[in-house]
Amino acid sequence: MADVIAAGGLLWRPGPAGGAEVAVVHRPRYDDWSLPKGKPEDGEPLAAAAAREIVEETGHIPVLGQRLPDVRYPVPAGQKTVHYWTARVAGGAFEASEEVDELRWLRAGQAQQLLSYAHDRRLLAGLDGATTIDATILLVRHAAAGKREDWHGDDDLRPLSGTGKLQAEGLRRVLPLFGARRVHSAPRTRCRQTVADLAADLGVEVVDEPLLSEEGYWADPVAALRKVVSIAQPAPGSAVVCSQGGAIPHIIGSLRARVGQPEMNLRSRKGSFWLLGFSTTPGGVRRLVTADHHPDALS
């Protein structure tokens, strides 16, 4: 028996009296209360499936955030694995349908009591971290650009390969689901090409960031980290930053070390991205809250 794959979200909004409320939906087919989720369509990336299912079941437009733990449970076809994200409401309104006939906005404690399944109730723990994030960076490693030894010109001008162009298209499709609104890039052709079409879609210019190339970063890591933190503004939407594999792991490791987070495997394959969520302390210091790796925007 094969695994059944699905994706969904912990959809939340600020509560009228402070705190946060989470969306819980009733499915008449099963007579249960659950979090919105569903199966991806053919060729659909999991993040795109999660966002689409949230829209279809709740009527609300989500901005995806942190990854939540995957959920696995038995179904008649085998094992079902559901990939979840936190998702902040960015608009829309609920309308009842055959699939979902009721939606309730509840505080976490109320949702704990109503949700039908223990695996959904466990995901509510992710709500606290999501609501503290006030700035997000989508840190991208440039897409594939062939082998350096096969390029005979200035390496700064090495362009994306055919595979790289497909990876860039995947990022173009997925990054807006995470609220992409601004675009920054190391001044390398392959970096700028990775995010150029995304920037055009968003109607913004690509801002050059010399400190975030490999050479720029290692020339002054302290200044480069200050630049990263300054880009993480608590403004509407997320900032996309395209950098290189020689800098990204150290950027993330340094930000994690500042807040006492343990060392981890800081993978950074070409065409992948990290979601970096920051919160601002009462004293105005911006601190890393979460670092989630998305190894392939195409899946």
Image (spheres, helix red, strand yellow):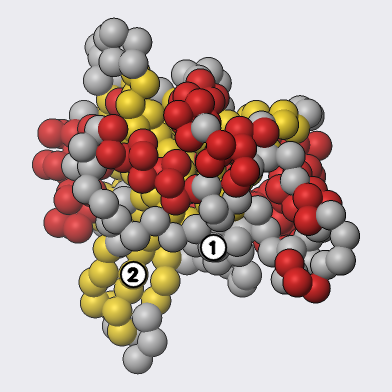
Mark 1 secondary-structure assignment: loop
Question: Does 142 sit left or right of 110 as displayed?
Answer: right
> What residue is shown at x 40% (from left), y 23% (from top)?
134
* Res 57 visible: no
Residue 265 visible in this rendered orientation of the protein: yes
Q: Quadrant of residue 109?
A: top left
Q: Quadrant of the C terminus?
A: bottom right
Q: Is label 2 in a helix, a strand or a loop?
A: strand
Task: Out of 214 and 290, give the one closest to the viewer.
Answer: 214
Decide if residue 85 is on the left or right side of residue 43: left
104 over 223 or under it: above or below = below
Residue 269's tag is 1
Residue 97's place in the image compared with 286, above or below, is below
In the displayed structure, 1 sits above or below 76; it is: below
Residue 22 position within the rendered picture, expressed as x and y whole percent measured from the top left: 30, 34
Q: Name the residue rendered at 80%, 73% in the picture.
A: 150
Which label sits in the foreground, 1 or 2? Answer: 1
| Image coordinates for residue 274, horizontal then vertical, percent | 47, 48
